[in-house]
Image: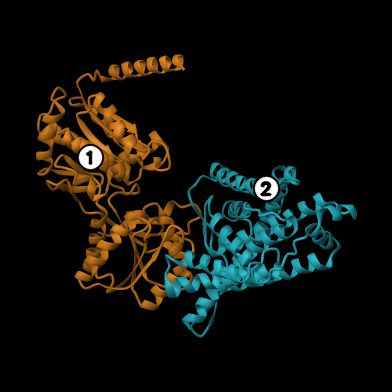
């Protein structure tokens, strides 16, 4: 019974990682850049949703929608001012800029909201009881939302015209623009979607782990990045599977091995996976064209 | 380059001259200390500075014995604290408040002791500070004393027979209380059925720890940690319907002031603290009002400890007819003997006494949260 409940905890934690990882993988898959500020966009989203719920007493669903809109706008602004000028720069320059944006957001949040921790109000606190097993509604909601987003993203990327343009940009920017695709617009759109997803993740993250502070995004951000790499970065189902597996491994190490070593073991698993399968679980083998 | 050097030198000269100017303390006993007034630990340094200033202002307004207070900035750094001590000596320090935080205090304590200057630190809780010598005393608890007190309280009030503990292994404060609590509890027959940990890197997900605590059948969860984590743990326990009594130490003070806190979830939480701003005791009310007017927020335990330090020194000076023209060493010798036998009533405790090795003996007050306020349950 306890084993089962650990699995549920693991899936619940893993689904949050998975949603964050979807944002990472989306941006990486199409724009070929690691957006290290993704975790901090989640932090901003959490603050905005917290303000709406706790200070303006808005209903939770409206607050989430406002959060999604705000994060999408934030993503577009960041993309326009920080990443767009670097479209033709080396990937290292973009990576460093992303780290800079991450610090900018953290310190900005500290200025606006101070560094003291706030607590997200409890929502969906009820549980379903099956025998001794308690499954919180929040866990179920997280998993459902996560699967739903994954399916929608896959349909969007694989079946729509815009999705096709995205895949084209991901394969070859130059050729795509020769075919009449607006590469800049497509990449901006990818960022907008990634940031909107971040807002959904901020709600699910804060509802499960209520502490909100300016650095709250960095650790889940790193874990989700690990999950994305674990599942094969660039692959949408890979991000989902990577996230869920990472969550389960983390909870199991905490429960059966050691709380203090859980992070070390999680990252050790990543190293082992990458040694055996360098592109991650579902990653495509990239053909290097010379 | 040469010009720059000359400018710097003359600047240093001017600064040292103004230093001398301040040295003319008219009929004042000079008290000095250092603390982090800037940087990440500045909350503690400022609290001590303002707390001590309020006490000095009150004492000076009485007429009679006059104090002059100098608090230097040490940024919670040993080297800066040593420099600050040199500056204080230039300013003619006669009694010291040492340092606000433990690490710098260890560095300065041996110097102060070697100079034969009496020091009473408001808040440096590490045991290495007072073991530096016979002139060094402290006002706050040592961390282990809280663990001992908590175990005694739990037994005396028969709160629980089986207890669980959760603590932050990466934090000295938490570890110190935890270790002494475990030792004391098992010595007096309280069974520790679950001993769980987290670290500063894993302080968001407490689901596995709560599961273990719930399955262990503990009636009480002892939490020698700070309030942010404590609140998250209580929320998680609530989610898993783990209905133990929650019992924390002074790190929990402040839990009701977290933004977004749900007071209903905190009903019945116990905490130990020597001082709380919400007390209705008249001396505390007076202090809280003055502090709020001066700083704009409620004082914490450190501010109250600093306030008490100044008053303890004042009482001891008055009793022994100490005057401003005595040397720091003469004052030091009188005070170190007198503190070991005096008794003091202050904001942070009544009948406070000290042992000759500088350790303070006072009882923390126990509070239980009822309807969103602290209720004394000693």
Q: Quadrant of residue B315?
A: top left
The residue labelled by disc 2 is: A94
Asked if marks 1 and 2 fall on the same chain, the answer is no
Q: Position of residue A263 (x, y in %)?
A: 49, 64
Helix, strand or loop at disc 2? Answer: helix
The answer to whether marks 1 and 2 mark residues whose Cβ atoms lie closer than 8 Å is: no
Judging from the image, mark 1 belongs to the subunit labelled B
Q: Of helix, strand and loop, which one carries label 1?
A: helix
Q: Colour of chain B?
A: orange
State the residue position of label 1. Answer: B109
Tell me if residue A138 can be seen.
no
Which colour represents chain A?
cyan
Graded by Cα atoms within 10 Å as few (under 14), some (14 to 19) or many (20 or more), the crowding at tag 2 reads: many
How many numbered discs, if any? 2
Q: Is A112 situated left or right of B307 in this image?
A: right
Closer to us: B11 or B316: B11
């Amino acid at each position: 019974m306890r084993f089962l409940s650990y699995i549920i905890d693991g899936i619940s934690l893993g689904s949050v990682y998975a949603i964050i990882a979807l944002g990472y993988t989306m941006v990486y898959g199409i724009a070929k850049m690691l957006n290290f500020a993704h975790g901090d966009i989640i932090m901003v989203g959490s603050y905005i949703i917290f303000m709406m719920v706790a200070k303006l007493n808005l209903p939770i669903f409206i607050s989430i929608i406002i959060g999604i809109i705000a994060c999408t706008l934030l993503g577009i602004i960041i993309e326009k001012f920080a990443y767009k000028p670097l479209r033709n720069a080396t990937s290292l320059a973009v990576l460093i800029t992303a780290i800079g944006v991450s610090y900018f957001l953290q310190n900005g949040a500290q200025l606006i909201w101070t560094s003291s921790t706030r607590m997200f109000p409890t929502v969906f606190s009820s549980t379903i009881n099956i025998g001794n097993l308690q499954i919180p509604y929040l866990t179920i909601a997280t998993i459902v939302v996560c699967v739903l987003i994954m399916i929608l993203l896959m349909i969007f990327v694989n079946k729509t015209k815009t999705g096709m343009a995205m895949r084209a940009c991901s394969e070859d920017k130059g050729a795509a623009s020769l075919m009449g695709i607006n590469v800049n617009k497509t990449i901006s759109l990818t960022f907008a979607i990634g940031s909107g997803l971040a807002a959904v993740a901020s709600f699910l993250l804060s509802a499960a782990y209520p502490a909100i502070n300016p650095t709250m995004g960095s650790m889940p951000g790193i874990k989700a990045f690990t999950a994305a790499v674990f599942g094969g970065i660039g692959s949408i189902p890979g991000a989902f599977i990577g996230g869920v597996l990472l969550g389960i491994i983390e909870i199991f190490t905490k429960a059966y091995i050691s709380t203090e070593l859980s992070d070390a073991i999680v990252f050790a698993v990543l190293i082992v996976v990458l040694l055996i399968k360098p592109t991650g679980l579902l990653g495509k083998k990239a053909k290097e064209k010379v | 380059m040469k010009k720059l050097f000359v400018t710097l030198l003359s600047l240093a000269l001017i600064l040292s001259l103004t230093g001398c100017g301040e040295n003319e303390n008219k009929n004042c006993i000079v008290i000095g200390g250092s603390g982090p007034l800037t940087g990440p630990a500045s909350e503690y340094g400022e609290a001590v500075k303002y707390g001590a200033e309020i006490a000095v202002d009150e004492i000076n307004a009485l007429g009679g014995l006059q104090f002059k207070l100098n608090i230097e900035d040490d940024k919670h750094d040993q080297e800066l604290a040593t420099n600050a001590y040199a500056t204080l000596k230039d300013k003619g320090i006669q009694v010291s408040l040492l340092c606000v935080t433990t690490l710098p205090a260890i560095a300065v304590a041996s110097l102060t002791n070697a100079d034969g200057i009496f020091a009473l630190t408001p808040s440096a809780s590490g045991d290495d500070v007072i073991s530096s010598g016979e002139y060094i005393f402290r006002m706050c608890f040592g961390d282990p004393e809280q663990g001992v007190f908590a175990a005694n309280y739990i037994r005396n009030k028969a709160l629980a027979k089986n207890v669980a503990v959760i603590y932050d292994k990466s934090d000295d404060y938490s570890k110190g209380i935890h270790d002494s609590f475990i030792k004391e509890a098992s010595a007096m027959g309280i069974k520790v059925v679950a001993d769980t940990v987290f670290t500063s890197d894993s302080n968001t997900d407490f689901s596995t720890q709560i599961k273990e605590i719930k399955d262990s059948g503990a009636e009480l969860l002892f939490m020698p940690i700070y309030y942010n984590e404590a609140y998250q743990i209580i929320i998680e326990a609530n989610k898993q319907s783990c209905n133990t009594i929650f019992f924390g130490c002074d790190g929990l003070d402040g839990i009701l002031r977290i933004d977004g806190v749900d007071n209903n979830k905190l009903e019945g939480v116990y905490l130990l603290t020597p001082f709380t701003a919400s007390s209705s005791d008249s001396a505390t009310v007076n202090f809280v009002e003055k502090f709020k007017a001066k700083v704009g927020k409620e004082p914490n335990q450190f501010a109250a400890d600093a306030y008490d330090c100044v008053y303890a020194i004042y009482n001891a000076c008055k009793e022994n007819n100490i005057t401003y023209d005595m040397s720091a060493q003469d004052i030091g010798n009188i005070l170190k003997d007198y503190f070991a036998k005096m008794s003091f009533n202050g904001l942070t405790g009544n009948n406070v006494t000290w042992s000759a090795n500088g350790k303070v003996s006072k009882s923390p007050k126990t509070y239980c949260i009822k309807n969103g306020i602290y209720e004394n349950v000693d």
